[in-house]
Image (cartoon, coloured by chain):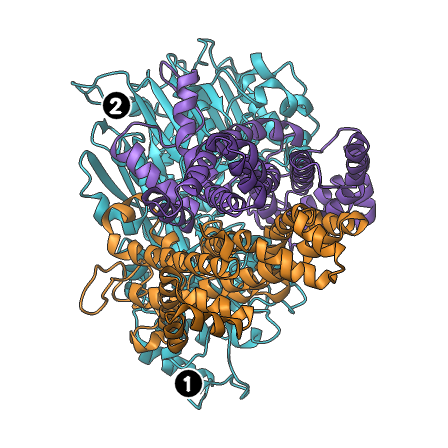
Amino acid sequence: MASDVAKMKGEITKAHKAVRGRSPLQLAMGRFMRNPLAVAGSIILLIIIFITVFAPLFTHWSPTNPDIMNTDAGPSALHWLGTDSNGYDNMARVLYGGRVDLTIAFAASIMVMVLGTIYGGISGFLGGWVDNLLMRFVDIMLNFPFISLVLVLEAIFNTSNEWMLILVVGLTAWPGAARMIRGVFLQLREQDYVIGAVTIGASRMRIIFRHILPNTLSLLTVLVSMSVAGYVGLDAGLSFLGLGVPPSVASWGAMLNTYSDYISLSTKPYAWIPPVVMIVLTILSINFIGDGLRDAFDPQSRS
Amino acid sequence: MATYIIRRLLGLIPTLFVITVIGFLMMHAMPGNAFEALVFNPKIKNGAALYHRLLAQNGLDQSLPVQYIHWIGNILQGNFGISYNYQQPVSQLIGTYLPNTLLLAVTAEILILIISIPIGLYQARKVNGPFDVSFSFIAVLLYSIPGFVFALFLLFIFSFSLGWLPSQGTISASGANAGSFLDHLQHLLLPALALALPSLAGYTRLTRGYTLQIIVADFVRTAKAKGLGSKRIMFRHIFRNAIIPLVTQFGFDIGGLFGGAILIEQIFTWPGMGELSLNATLNRDYPLILATTLLFAVMVLIGNLIADILLAASDPRIRLN
Amino acid sequence: MKKRSIMMSAAAVLSFGSLLASLGTAASAHTTPKLSGITNGGTIVQTFSTQFGANMIPMLDSSVYTQQILGYQFDTLLSIDQNDHLIGDLVNKWWYSKDRKTIFFQLSPKAKWSNGKPVTIADVKLGIDWLASKSYNNADQGSYGYLVQNIVGASNPITDGTTPSGFKQISNSEFSLTMAQPDAAVLGSMWQGIQPLPSFLLGKIPMSKWKSSQYDKFIPVGSGAYIMTQIIPGQSVTMKANPYYVMGVPHISTNVFKVVSPDVVDGDLASGQVTIAGIQHKDYAAMKKVPGLNFTITPNNAFDYLGWRLNNAVYGKEFSNVKFRQAVEYAINRPALINALEKGFATIENGPLPPVNFWYNKALNNAYAFSPAKANQLLDQAGFKIKNGWRTTPGGRPFTPTLTITSGDSQIATEATFIKSFLNAVHINLVVNPPINFNTVLNQLNGDANGKQPIQGFLLAWNLSNDPDPRGLWRATDNLNITSIDWTNTKDPAVVLNDKLIHEQHTAAAFDISYRKNILDQWQTLVSKNMPENFLYDGESIMAYSNKLHGVVFSPYGLLFPYRWYLSN
């Protein structure tokens, strides 16, 4: 890639030749790599994933085995970020915590992106009775009783863990996104350029993928980064209500939940700032990547 | 348009039916019921007998289809039943809790719209300027932090440290100005802000993103070429188009707002629909579960319908039929 | 919500020390001490951590918070003081018949409703009729019918508005209650708690209509220290001092109960928006630095325990082995558990009564000192052999018991993790199941008579009343023992002895305090030795309150005598 970028900086004619020889995807990648924020976002996200996956390299404490003799300890040489009231090492929890949060967020984003786009796209593009039928199903899914589902699954499997939550999230995350994507499709398919494409006999697939989909990227970016934001905090919200993953499972959301009270906020910044920073960095980097992708695939949108 | 609306309204009925059936089945699939704890109450002499009597009294010993038909029959007569847990008529409970939720939700929604749209438009006009960049960053910060943490921050600053605003309730319990307009406003401000801030950031991003996409469209260029003023272009040409996804989102949110914001409600002791429906589920309070499910579904469906109608109104080319 | 998962009240009896001491004497010694420098007036704010129920007819709502509100508004016949002694209230004199079957009561001449009308025998009768009625017990699911069930004629719910034959009016201020068999527990655990009801207000309404009447939403009179003036549903109840209160006019003029989330209660205390509230143990050290607050630590009359389903299909036989349960008790390092979970604010519990209780058998103090060696020895004796580092059942099967915990309480999950590590140290391969919803656990406990239940071990807590009467909880016939023990094996001599001792502690002979103490000591020793459940510890609660608030009487039975509290400037 570095050599590609070097080439781009060459003479205009030369560049023109080089560009002409490459696919739109390669072009987009090139543009993406020249966007400093997007590159920074990718690097930050990779670092976070690396830390999360290789957490044992950075701490010898386990996030699931509490240190009984040292509960609610302040930062020390032993526990760099102290321990919580159950004796879990905060440092270990920050490092390992991303596993649950990122998996849930990842599952939600995939569902939003794939199912939301395909479902919403088909509905919006085809319109008519297909749209009507598909949207009624979305209406039903939007009303799906989330908490009941958690309780029912919990009883069926006689357990509650992060995988169940992921399953539930996967089932319930996409309908909202599908509705929004459909709205955009409804609007875009009436645009002159789409009608033009239809007139010259372009295939449906080509119209969807070449002409409409790139225009939904801006919305998709916002949707994905917001759903990641929403779902990073989801397990925290659920444990707040007495549902969701057991406290022995480390997650940033759960850490925030543990420290979200008056006394902790005022006296234990060492414990709640790290998970907040991790969550914000993750979402920030996803945003930058999303913006970068949009600019790369839709160069017109940059002004 | 009128026939479309009527058709869609009629179309709600089968959807509502399916939703209530799913809700009904899920509710019965949850283990346990509202009366089971009586068996474990050491003070009740014959808990098991009372338990079975209560099951029979509430028709829970009948088959599920019979129970469902019974419920539908009562609903059609306007009878939502009596909550097992609160021991009050369900309609009365909703009458108490729904206004609180509405007040909070509508205030939050107004805050969101009047703040986010101007900011988004301004960001798009001065794209990549210092305001745009710094607010984009703030927006991410706002929606990355879970709402309940925000709520606690707000409380920490404005109630506990500065002492400007009360920390809980919809009005003061006692005191000279309890129940006055100012009293309501003081109680409303913090929860509404806590509810609005995360969505506010999202709406700003959407407005900015869409405006940017439309700013480069041909018709905007044409408008510019015609020599129209930039304000006119912004509002007549750009805003009208950029608002479409916002409208969809807004219609979508209307329904969600009725569901309440459970965490915000608990933190601020704001007795609303969120807490009501959660308690109903946790306590297996069947009549209340069904009533809140139905209410929530009706609101979501109407919200979606409004979104569709607004969508068509904002762009006459969109054919809904 | 960070609340304890299960709180059920066990049946209770009275303290006989006070009863015998005050026989035939007026309890007027317990009136407000006249202190100089007490100012009157002001408002205090107390908190509930979740919503209160909306039914304001006394004894109707199952919410403990509603009970607390109505406890302020309606006084009982007698009350209990901080030393667990029975003292006069609306009744100022009471005495027994010779056969111990009848108790005579005399209403205090000072007993008045908040509108100035005297509390009459008709009001007492209405209170009893209500608790005994079919409407209350059947249609309205009232759970305090047990208060009057020992009165002759009230053992089963009776027609609305009729009076059990055991009630007799003697004069304008005296009445008597009669039971079929003498019961040493009846006054303190039952009859003491009867609330006279305003017959001029409720008497004309049929009982079946009470719940739908306006008074169920708001009841404007009472006989207690504070009377409600405003209810904001789900948020707060404002109460004003009762000018005709039997114990004297309360010093503080307004008392407000507010629903406050446990996450913000510390901030409300620090900023003065709440006057008095319980705080979490982990916050105590930091809260002590907040200016303007005082703290009091009181033991709870409650305990946490680890239970085993003795009729479990997989390991029921192993759990039924008393040596297994004793070994578990030795294996758990409870001082460490208390330090970790309760920051040291708890006492070790080795038997069925918490050490704070007057009837606690002090001989049990060090019954099960932490000793992995003893635990290993007991397990070896019972035949749990070690294979590949883990113990097998005496039959040679792998032994991997599970522990079920309820969701919504991070502390209980940590407790489980600790117990797992202690049991692993004695080679018991305990597996902690992920937490599940409380109603699901109840359902599994209730539906598992066939022994196929998924629950093996579980962690629960009991809230006790002031008296140790074990009936309702500990007899082989009690329906509740599925959450504690499964002593349905009536051939077991230990179970037979248990039931015999429980019977003896409430017979006529048990009216003698030393006799009853002796029986209860024997019973506690028996239960402690048999460990039908593994007793863990008795927690303490920490109350934080404004340093302007004085006169609060802290006790394991709650904050007592609100009429004596006062605010300084």
Q: Chain of mark 1?
A: C
The amino acid marked with disc number 2 is: Tyr
Amino acid type at mark 1: Asp
Q: What is the display colour for chain A?
A: orange
Q: Are marks 2 and 1 in contact (CB under 8 Å)?
A: no
Whether residue C308 is visible here, answered yes or no, is no
Q: Nearer the viewer, residue A230 or B48?
A: A230
Under tag 1, what secondary structure? helix
Query: To which residue does mark 2 refer?
Result: C566
Camera-nearest residue between B43 and B226: B226
* Residue B122 percent location from the top left of the image: 42, 37
Instruction: Identify by letter the chain in cyan.
Output: C
Report the chain shown in purple: B
Q: Residue at x 41, y 13 (%)?
A: C109
Q: Whole-Å distance between the Cαs marked 2 and 1?
A: 61 Å
Pointer 2 chain? C
Residue sitting nearer the eye, C443 or A133: A133
**Vertical arrangement, residue A9 with respect to residue A183, above or below:** below
To which residue does mark 1 refer?
C380
